[in-house]
């Protein structure tokens, strides 16, 4: 009886129902369009032209950013004196096109991944930090860079953000509030487990960290930079990762102890050289 009544009502009011459905659909479409427009920042309105807008992670007490790859990119920007502004937001890693930091906006282009950004800016600004290298030297520099970025990076992350996370938060190295410590540990542990480094014991990680830092000391020797007298992109990457191991990792970490106890003097001189030249504001960056 009730069903019959409902279908009769529907038949009589089918035109109204169709119109209602159209209005609901159109509203949903417009809302979606509107929210997309809001997310798409417009160059010249939401941010200035001809300036790289850098989206970093966040400051630690002992260094300008807690992301290795932000420091890599910023060192490159400073080397070439490319004008940039940092847009600090602790959620930046969720907002960028690759859901990682760093990411940039430049004259209408939004881009993630430090290496892709460097290659893009090389073209935009007609610069090339590696122009002094031969083809073979470029390939060797790339191999060293990937060792540091894809292996030492994860050892560094596992140490600072899993094994010594209590000290990382206690010592003010973390830009995240204390109440987020457990969530951050869980998030990072999931990543390092997936990558593989998170499956090693604490002792194994310490041993790998120490032995890789010593190998980096051997690669450097008494050279000013990794490939000789001139700085290249590989040095921006190495500085990004190894500066975190020295200045943004708790001093109880066996890797940090190597720096403090004078065991890797060439690495110390190398980091000091780059910091003194490009990061006079390391302790309190002028953003
Ligand atoms: N290959 C990327 C790596 C960037 C990266 O791993 N960034 C980390 C911070 S150092 C990040 O955003 N992690 C957040 C996540 O993976 O969810 C690049 O060179 O930019």
Image (cartoon, rainbow, N blue to C red):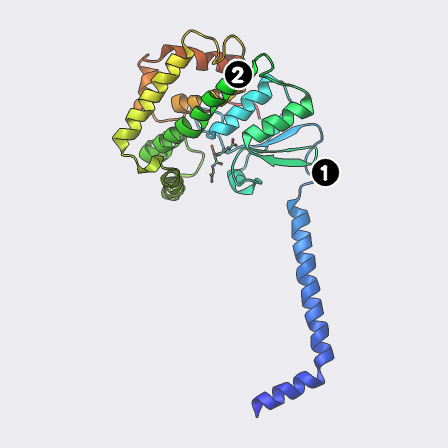
* Position of the N terminus by quadrant: bottom right
In this rendered view, identify the residue nearer to me: 203 or 91: 203
Identify the residue at image location x=50%, y=9%: 228
Alpha carbon distance from label 2 to label 1:
45 Å
Q: Is residue 122 left or right of residue 223?
A: right
* Position of the C terminus by quadrant: top right
Residue behind mark 1: 45
Q: Tell me where residue 7 appears, x and y as whole percent.
A: 63, 86
Comparing labels 2 and 1, the label whose residue is closer to the camera: 2
In this rendered view, identify the residue nearer to me: 82 or 45: 82
Q: Is residue 83 left or right of residue 169?
A: right
Residue 33 in the image: above or below residue 177: below
Q: Tell me where residue 115 appears, x and y as whole percent.
A: 55, 28
Residue 54 in the image: above or below residue 255: below
Note whether ligand 1 is within 8 Å of mark 1. Answer: no
Dot 1 lies on which element?
A: loop
Q: How many marks overall? A: 2
Using the rendered image of the protein, determine whether residue 120 is visible from the camera's viewpoint: yes
Residue situated furthest front in the rendering:
136
Find residue 75 and report its image quarter: top right
Q: Tell me where residue 152 appears, x and y as whole percent.
A: 40, 26
Dot 2 lies on which element?
A: helix
Mark 2–mark 1 CB contact (< 8 Å): no
In this rendered view, identify the residue nearer to me: 114 or 71: 114
Q: Is residue 204 left or right of residue 270?
A: left
Using the rendered image of the protein, determine whether residue 83 is visible from the camera's viewpoint: no
Residue 225 in the image: above or below residue 190: above
Residue behind mark 2: 136
Identify the residue at image location x=25%, y=29%: 203
Q: Tell me where residue 174 appears, x and y as whole percent.
A: 42, 33
Q: Is residue 136 left or right of residue 252?
A: right
Find residue 158 and report its image quarter: top left
């Amino acid at each position: 009886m009730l069903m019959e009544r409902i279908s009769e009502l529907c038949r009589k009011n089918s035109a109204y129902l169709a119109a209602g459905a159209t209005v609901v659909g159109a509203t949903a479409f417009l809302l979606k369009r509107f929210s997309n427009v809001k997310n798409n920042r417009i160059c010249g309105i939401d941010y200035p032209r001809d300036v790289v807008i850098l989206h970093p992670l966040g400051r630690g007490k002992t260094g300008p950013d807690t992301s290795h790859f932000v420091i890599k990119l910023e060192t490159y920007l400073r080397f070439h004196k490319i004008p940039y502004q940092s847009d600090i937001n602790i959620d930046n890693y969720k907002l960028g096109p690759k859901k990682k930091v760093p990411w940039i906006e430049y004259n209408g282009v939004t881009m993630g991944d430090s290496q892709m950004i460097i290659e893009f800016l090389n073209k935009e600004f007609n610069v090339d930090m590696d122009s002094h290298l031969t083809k073979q030297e470029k390939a060797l520099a790339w191999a060293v860079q990937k060792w540091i970025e894809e292996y030492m990076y994860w050892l560094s992350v596992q140490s600072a953000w899993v094994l010594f996370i209590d000290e990382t938060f206690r010592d003010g190295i973390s830009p995240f509030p204390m109440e987020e410590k457990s969530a951050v540990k869980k998030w990072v542990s999931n990543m390092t487990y997936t990558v593989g480094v998170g499956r090693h014991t604490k002792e194994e990680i310490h041993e790998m960290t120490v032995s890789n830092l010593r190998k980096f000391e051997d690669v450097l020797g008494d050279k000013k930079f990794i490939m000789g007298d001139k700085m290249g992109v590989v040095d921006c990457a190495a500085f990004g990762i190894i500066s975190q191991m020295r200045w943004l990792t708790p001093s109880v970490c066996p890797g940090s102890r190597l720096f403090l106890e004078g065991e890797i003097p060439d690495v110390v001189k190398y980091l000091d050289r780059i910091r003194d030249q490009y990061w006079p504001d390391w302790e309190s960056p002028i953003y």
